[in-house]
Image: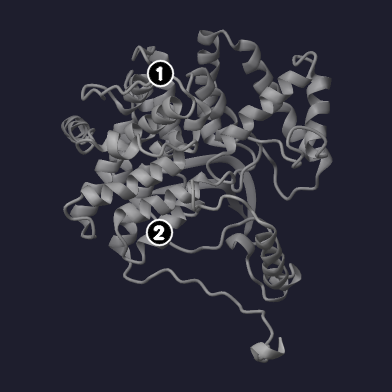
């Protein structure tokens, strides 16, 4: 790394102090100028910034002009996700490709359309010649999201028409990215696992006959084997992470960047950068680490009193990472329940039984039940809290033997579908760049000559 400074020098630290002193904005000014911090009001309600047909998140109902918290509901293109998932599960089908069609095109496919669409995705499940060797295997990173972003931006160079933002071309690009995200993610991990961790290198080719979820397990495992239940629950996890309204950080990023007229690869790379943030895509990693810490520090994690005491210590910043959070509990929108967690829970129990991890599942269930009560007693909150989808997804991934480095890329493999739908929606419906206003609160300062400073 000669010539590349990787240390924070004393001079950098000094300059940082100057930056902080002159850039910090007093918090009371947000109230003075009625600025919605984080684009949310005091009740946590997001500022209305756009319109969408793609998905809808419902956590309240209107009664006499008041918003009353209710059981959470999530709709994909107007269809309740609970009904949607029950439909293909009862038929014994995996649903990723079918739900992808729904989100992109606004309606469910018939049998012929679904078969053709599956073939369309399968035909694009390949990377340019030598891409794995020349791009993914070079300079492997311990962070798979950075590896994924680099691969996406490099694919721009292999596209014969990368700048064309006409809808057919953007759809072509999006379908290709949806198809290759599993390969980019898993191959990136295999490079890291081999070159940085010194483990064996496995590069398996995907199968055109298998679904997205099945191919992920095939690509990742040395023996390419998996059970039907494993494929089913990974498929369900991907579907439940596919889309969650236009206001989540990475999807809003997709809208903002797409509105500038930039290319698809740049827009998706920007969304990946957003999702990488631990406040967005890394929550399930925190949940898994929190439970591991809990199991190591409790003498009996079937004891409700011990678990309750641990949860109080979390809120008091006395244990784990001392940030005062119970990870996986609470959501920016949902209060009484997160429908994704509710759908997930039954399958999690089945997988825990198959994997011989029922005791851990019981601990998760206990925390899900106790945490809202403890939070309610310890803190004054404006709405209820419940387990969110991240509460169980990390546990599922650990039971599927997915390495923790791939937890957030799994989110990206799912959410690329939602990002693609929103990118096309943005290009279809607006020709204006998204440009919100910021209030300047810096007082005027007279210029001072260099010799007098």
Left/right of residue 76 with respect to residue 401 in the rendered view:
left
Left/right of residue 88 with respect to residue 252 in the rendered view:
left
Name the residue rendered at 55%, 31% in the picture.
Answer: 341
Per the model, the C-alpha gap separating discs 2 and 1 is 40 Å
Mark 2, residues whose alpha carbon is within 10 Å: few (<14), some, or many (≥20)? Answer: many
Task: Report x, y in % for residue 160.
Answer: 16, 52
Q: Is residue 400 visible?
A: yes
Q: Quick one: label 2 or label 1, which is nearer the N terminus?
A: 1
Residue on which the image places disc 2: 255
Task: Report x, y in % for residue 208.
Answer: 21, 25
Q: Are marks 2 and 1 in contact (CB under 8 Å)?
A: no
- Along the line of sight, which residue is nearer the eye, 447 or 226? 447
Name the residue rendered at 61%, 57% in the picture.
Answer: 45
Task: Report x, y in % for residue 415.
Answer: 41, 42
Task: Report x, y in % for residue 107.
Answer: 28, 43
Q: Which mark is residue 311?
A: none
Q: Secondary structure at mark 2?
A: helix
Give the label, 2 or 1, closer to the camera.
1
Q: Quadrant of residue 446?
A: bottom right
- Point out the image quarter for the C terminus: bottom right
Residue on which the image places disc 1: 200
Q: Quadrant of residue 90?
A: top left
Mark 1, residues whose alpha carbon is within 10 Å: few (<14), some, or many (≥20)? Answer: few
Q: Secondary structure at mark 1?
A: loop
Q: How many marks?
A: 2
């Amino acid at each position: 790394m000669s010539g590349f400074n990787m240390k924070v020098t004393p001079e950098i630290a000094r300059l940082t102090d100057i930056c902080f002193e002159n850039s910090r904005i007093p918090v009371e000014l947000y109230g003075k100028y009625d600025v919605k911090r984080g684009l949310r009001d005091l009740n946590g309600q997001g500022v209305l910034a756009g319109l969408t047909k793609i998905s809808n998140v419902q956590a309240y109902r209107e009664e006499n002009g008041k918003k009353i918290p209710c059981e959470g509901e999530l709709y994909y293109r107007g269809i309740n996700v609970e009904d949607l998932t029950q439909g293909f599960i009862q038929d014994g089908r995996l649903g990723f490709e079918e739900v992808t069609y729904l989100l992109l095109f606004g309606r469910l496919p018939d049998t012929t359309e679904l078969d053709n669409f599956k073939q369309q995705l399968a035909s694009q499940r390949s990377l340019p010649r030598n891409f794995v060797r020349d791009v993914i295997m070079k300079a492997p990173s311990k962070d798979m999201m950075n590896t994924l972003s680099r691969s996406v931006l490099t694919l721009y160079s292999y596209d014969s028409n990368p700048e064309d933002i006409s809808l057919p071309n953007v759809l072509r690009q999006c379908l290709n990215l949806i198809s290759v995200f599993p390969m980019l993610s898993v191959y990136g991990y295999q490079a890291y696992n081999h070159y940085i961790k010194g483990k064996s290198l496995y590069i398996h080719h995907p199968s055109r006959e298998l679904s997205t979820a099945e191919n992920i397990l095939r690509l990742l495992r040395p023996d390419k084997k998996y059970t039907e239940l494993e494929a089913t629950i990974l498929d369900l996890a991907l579907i439940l992470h596919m889309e969650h309204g236009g206001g989540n950080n990475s999807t809003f990023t997709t809208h903002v960047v797409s509105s500038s007229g930039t290319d698809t690869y740049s827009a998706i790379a920007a969304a990946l950068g957003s999702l990488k943030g631990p406040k967005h895509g890394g929550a399930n990693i925190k949940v898994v680490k929190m439970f591991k810490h809990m199991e190591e520090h409790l003498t009996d994690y079937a004891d409700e009193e011990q678990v309750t005491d641990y949860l109080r210590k979390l809120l008091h910043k006395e244990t784990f990472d001392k940030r005062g959070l119970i990870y996986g509990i609470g959501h920016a929108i949902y209060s009484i329940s997160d429908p994704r967690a509710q759908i997930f829970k039954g399958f999690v129990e089945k997988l825990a039984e198959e994997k011989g991890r029922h005791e851990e599942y019981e601990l998760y269930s206990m925390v899900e039940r106790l945490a809202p009560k403890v939070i309610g007693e310890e803190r004054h909150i404006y709405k209820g809290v419940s387990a969110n989808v991240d509460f169980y997804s990390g546990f599922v991934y650990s039971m599927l033997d997915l390495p923790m480095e791939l937890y957030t890329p799994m989110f990206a493999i799912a959410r690329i579908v939602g990002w693609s739908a929103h990118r096309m929606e943005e290009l279809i419906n607006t020709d204006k760049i998204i440009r919100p206003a910021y209030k300047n609160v810096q007082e005027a300062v007279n210029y001072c000559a260099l010799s007098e400073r």
